[in-house]
Image (tube, rainbow, N blue to C red):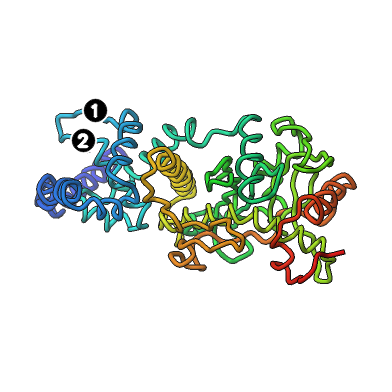
C-alpha cells in the first residue's frame, strides 16, 4: 500500500470520527429560552418600572438613584449613542432599556447574572450593554458636566465658594486620590497590584465647594508608587509644567497680602506654590494649628464629594468584577452622573440625590452630613497614603507661611481658637 493510500485512510477515519462526535452532541432544545421570551411581560423594564413611574416615584429614585425627570433627561442625552440596527433575527434592546440595565448595575453593584434574571436578558448581553452604556454616558456628559474649568470658573470658585462658604480665600479646589479596587485581571501580573495587597486602578479628582468634580483622572495602574500617582495625573502635570491654567496672584480679603490661587490636600500630598498641605508634626505652634484647621475645613469638600459618590453609586463600595478597561468606564460614568445630578438639582431645586443635611454644612462647628451614616469605611475606594514628598521649595513654604499668618490675624474666624482648643487669641 502506498503512502497516498495511507493518507487517504487516515483522512477518512478522521472525517468519520468528527461526524460521529457531532451526532453525539446534545441537540439544542430551544433557540431562545422561554424565560427570555417573557421579557416584554415579566422583565423589570416592562413590568416594574412603568408601575413605579405612575404610582411610586420614590421607589423609582431608590431604584436608579435619580428621579423620573432626571432619568428622562439623561435618556434623551445618551439615546442617540445607544441605538442599534434592526435585524431579521430579533429586535434590539431599546436605548432606554440599555440605560436602565446599566444604571441598576451602577446603583447597586449587582452582578451581571442578577441583572440578567431581573431584566430577562442573557448574561452575555448584560456584559456588552454595561460598558457600552458607560462609554455613552461619559461621551455625552463629560463635555458639558465634567469639562475642565476656565480661569473665570476658578476665580468664581475661589471667591463665591471656598472664600465665602469655607473661609479659605484663593482656594480653587480640594484634591484627593483613591485606589478603586478591582478583581485581579487575567495575565496582568503585578500591573494593578497595590501596596494594600489588592488590585486597583487610580481615581485622582479635584472638586469645588459645591461637591462637584472639576477634574478627574481615572485608570492609572495601581502598582504605581503613591508618590508617582499625583505626578502622573493630569493635575500633577499641569502644576509642574504649566500653571497658566490658574488665575494669577490676588489680594486676600481685608489684607494687603497678595497670594497665588491654590489647591488644597491632606498630608499625603507634597507642598507646592499652588498646592497647600498641612504642617506636619505634633508640637506645632498655635498659628500652624489654626492653618491646619482652616485647610482641613476646606479639604472636607473632596471628602464629601467622594462620600456622596459612594453612597449613591454602590458599585464603588466593593471590588469591581470587570476588566480594568470596563472598570475605568464604570468610574467615569459614576463621576459624570454625580455631576449631572448635582447640577440638575441646583437648577430645579428638587433635592433628592443630595438632599439638605446629606452633605456637611459649613456652620460655626461643621455639621457632619448624613452620607457618613450611609457608607461603610471598608468600601471599594481605598485611601492613598502618600502622593508626594516632604521636600518643597522656599517659595512654596513662604506661600504657606503667609496663609498661616493671614488666618491668625486679619483673616481670623471668631470660633477658630475654640476649635483648636484655645481659650484666648494666640500670641
Q: Which residue is mark 2?
A: 92
Cα separation between marks 1 and 2: 7 Å
Tell me if mark 2 has few (under 14), some (14-19) or many (20+) residues whose alpha carbon lies within 10 angstroms of its own: few
Is residue 338 shown left or right of residue 133?
right
Q: Quadrant of the C terminus?
A: bottom right
Q: Where's the N terminus, which quadrant?
A: top left
Tell me if I can see residue 191 in this picture. no
The image quarter containing residue 269 is bottom right
Query: Which one is nearer the viewer's eye here, 80 or 303?
Result: 303
In the visual, does 221 lie left or right of 146? right
Q: Earlier in the sequence, mark 1 or mark 2?
A: 1
* Local SS, label 1: loop
SS type, badge 2: loop
Q: Nearer the viewer, residue 238 or 410?
A: 410
The image shows residue 139, relative to residue 199, as above or below, that is: above
Q: Is 267 situated left or right of 281 in this image?
A: left
Q: Which mark is residue 85?
A: 1
| Labelled pair 1, 2 in contact (Cβ < 8 Å) | yes
Residue 325, x across and y down, in percent: 48, 45
Residue 297 x/y as whole percent:
65, 57
Q: Is residue 54 left or right of residue 159?
A: left
Q: Relative to residue 382, is residue 9 depicted above or below?
A: above
Residue 356 percent location from the top left of the image: 43, 54
Q: Position of residue 108 (x, y in %)?
A: 35, 57
105 vs 349: above or below: below
> In this orientation, which residue lies closer to the viewer: 117 or 173?
173
Q: How many marks?
A: 2
Q: Residue at x 16, y 51 (%)?
A: 55
Amino acid at each position: 500500500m502506498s503512502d497516498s493510500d495511507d493518507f487517504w485512510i487516515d483522512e477518512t477515519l478522521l472525517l468519520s470520527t468528527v461526524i460521529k462526535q457531532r451526532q453525539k452532541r446534545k441537540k439544542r432544545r430551544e433557540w431562545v429560552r422561554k424565560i427570555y421570551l417573557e421579557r416584554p411581560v415579566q422583565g423589570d423594564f416592562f413590568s416594574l418600572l412603568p408601575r413605579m413611574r405612575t404610582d411610586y416615584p420614590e421607589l423609582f429614585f431608590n431604584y436608579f438613584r435619580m428621579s423620573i425627570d432626571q432619568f428622562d433627561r439623561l435618556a434623551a442625552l445618551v439615546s442617540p449613542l445607544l441605538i442599534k440596527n434592526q435585524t431579521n433575527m430579533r429586535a434590539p434592546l431599546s436605548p432606554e432599556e440599555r440605560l436602565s440595565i446599566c444604571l441598576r448595575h451602577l446603583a447597586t453593584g449587582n452582578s451581571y447574572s442578577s441583572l440578567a434574571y431581573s431584566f430577562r436578558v442573557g448574561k452575555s448581553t448584560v456584559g456588552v450593554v454595561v460598558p457600552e452604556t458607560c462609554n455613552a454616558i461619559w461621551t455625552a456628559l463629560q463635555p458639558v458636566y465634567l469639562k475642565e474649568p476656565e480661569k473665570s470658573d476658578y476665580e468664581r470658585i475661589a471667591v463665591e465658594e471656598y472664600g465665602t462658604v469655607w473661609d479659605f480665600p484663593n482656594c480653587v479646589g480640594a484634591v484627593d486620590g483613591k485606589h478603586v479596587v478591582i478583581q485581579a485581571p487575567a495575565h496582568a501580573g503585578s500591573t494593578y497590584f497595590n501596596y494594600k495587597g489588592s488590585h486597583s486602578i487610580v481615581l485622582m479628582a479635584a472638586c469645588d465647594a459645591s461637591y462637584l468634580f472639576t477634574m478627574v483622572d481615572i485608570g492609572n495602574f495601581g502598582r504605581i508608587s503613591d508618590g508617582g500617582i499625583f505626578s502622573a495625573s493630569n493635575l500633577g502635570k499641569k502644576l509642574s509644567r504649566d500653571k497658566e491654567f490658574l488665575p494669577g496672584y490676588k489680594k486676600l480679603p481685608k489684607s494687603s497680602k497678595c497670594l497665588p490661587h491654590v489647591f488644597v490636600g491632606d498630608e499625603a500630598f507634597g507642598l507646592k506654590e499652588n498646592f497647600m498641605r498641612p504642617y506636619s508634626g505634633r508640637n506645632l505652634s498655635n498659628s500652624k494649628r489654626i492653618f491646619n484647621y482652616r485647610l482641613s475645613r476646606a479639604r472636607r469638600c473632596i471628602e464629601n464629594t467622594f462620600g456622596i459618590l459612594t453612597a449613591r453609586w454602590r458599585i464603588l463600595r466593593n471590588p469591581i468584577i470587570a476588566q480594568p478597561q470596563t472598570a475605568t468606564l464604570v468610574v467615569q460614568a459614576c463621576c459624570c452622573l454625580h455631576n449631572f445630578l448635582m447640577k440638575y438639582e441646583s437648577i430645579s431645586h428638587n433635592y433628592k440625590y443630595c438632599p439638605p443635611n446629606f452633605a456637611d454644612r459649613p456652620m460655626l462647628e461643621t455639621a457632619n452630613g448624613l452620607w457618613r451614616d450611609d457608607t461603610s469605611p471598608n468600601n471599594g475606594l481605598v485611601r492613598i497614603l502618600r502622593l508626594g514628598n516632604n521636600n518643597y521649595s522656599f517659595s512654596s513654604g513662604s506661600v504657606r507661611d503667609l496663609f498661616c499668618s493671614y488666618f491668625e490675624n486679619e483673616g481670623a474666624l471668631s470660633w477658630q481658637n475654640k476649635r483648636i482648643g484655645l481659650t484666648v487669641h494666640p500670641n
